[in-house]
Amino acid sequence: MTSETPPRRGRGRRPAAEVRAGVLRAAADLLLGEGIKAVTFDRVAAAAGSSKVTLYKWWPSAGALAAEAYFTHSAPRLEFPDTGDLRADLITQMRAFVRLLTAGGAGPVIAGLIGVAQTDPELSAAFSRHYSRPRRALALTTFEKARDRGELRPDVDLTLLVDQLWGACYHRLLVPDEPLTEDFAVALVDNALDGARPR
Amino acid sequence: MTSETPPRRGRGRRPAAEVRAGVLRAAADLLLGEGIKAVTFDRVAAAAGSSKVTLYKWWPSAGALAAEAYFTHSAPRLEFPDTGDLRADLITQMRAFVRLLTAGGAGPVIAGLIGVAQTDPELSAAFSRHYSRPRRALALTTFEKARDRGELRPDVDLTLLVDQLWGACYHRLLVPDEPLTEDFAVALVDNALDGARPR
């Protein structure tokens, strides 16, 4: 987005980056506190002390704003460790991910985002751009390094591992027939690496 | 639409099971033709030549009716082969599943169902009862037989395999950053059985 958004009177003196960060924080607070339906341009503008015109300029829809706000909120909680031991690093990351979705309360939020994304192309695009694609890229970098260290077979489709690990967790989040737990996360890592047939 | 849609008079004489099947067929037609938002009690009742009162008696919400209709429609297309070779049977089933979601046009339908389920507890419960739990149970039966034949390690969490196979496909359906293809389905089966680390 642009950084040269012009001031609206008075409060326009704040730098655009600061205004933007404040809007994202306000949107994240509404999203985490009350869910996706609370993230409207009206309510976010009021909470952030911004104008709706500013919001319309930066985000194509309230859904797109919500998706970016979720990413901004969750990114620091989802760092990818790199200790040189793929299994240990994956278990650390996946447990943190499951904790964020369960005890951390982000589960219903991200389920709501993905739910609405099925009928809101703007939100779907924003979710992809600001959340799921960057997170896929982080995981791939980790997998490539591990492959270069000999921890993964050279012929394995690394992209697919993302679906078999985080995708499996999203499945339990969105179709909650079985519990989403840290033990499940650990077992996912073990099976993705070791396979289910006898060695 | 159904071919034997009954006259509006005298319909009470039809057996309940027949009426029920007709309503589910009409709901499935609307769902597959126009999407989840088209499945309202008004439109289904009109299409099936039934009364809304009858529909309210049988289904707690239009979403619940849609979920059951989808199950009724898809079940014959998702049979689980049992040739005694787990890998081959999984590949057959998973390819049929991906074909149903992509070329078969069911992808947007099931994505819409799961999407709405995030904010519609009735639909979520119906989806679970009529679709996802029965399908999980079918897969588990297959896995248990394969384990008894020695094709799976005795210590593997069989429930988790459902998430690493079908769950991974739902992930690509709902968060479409990477393509959902039959090749992907085959690679999922191989990795779930063989694992990604060198053997």
Image (cartoon, coloured by chain):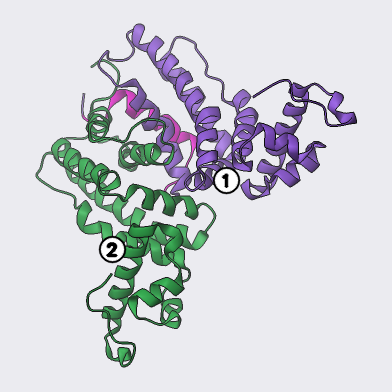
Chain colours: A purple, B green
Quadrant of the image occupied by residue A8: top right
Residue A86 vs residue A147, the one in the foreground = A147
Quadrant of the image occupied by residue B62: bottom left
Task: Check if residue A150 falls in the magenta segment.
Answer: no
Disc 1 marks which amino acid? Pro
Image mark for residue A108: 1
x and y percentages locating residue B132 in the rendered image: 35, 53
Residue identifier under label 2: B72
x and y percentages locating residue A117 in the rendered image: 51, 43
- Magenta stretch bounds: A177-197
Image quarter hosting the N terminus of chain B: bottom left
Q: Is residue B27 left or right of residue A14?
A: left
Q: Residue at x 42, y 58 (%)?
A: B36
Quadrant of the image occupied by residue B8: bottom left
Mark 2–mark 1 Cα distance, whole angstroms, equals 29 Å
State whether residue A104 appears in this view.
no
Disc 2 marks which amino acid? Thr
Furthest-left residue in this view:
B83
Chain ID of residue with mark 2: B
Q: Residue at x 29, y 53 (%)?
A: B135
- Element carrying mark 1: helix
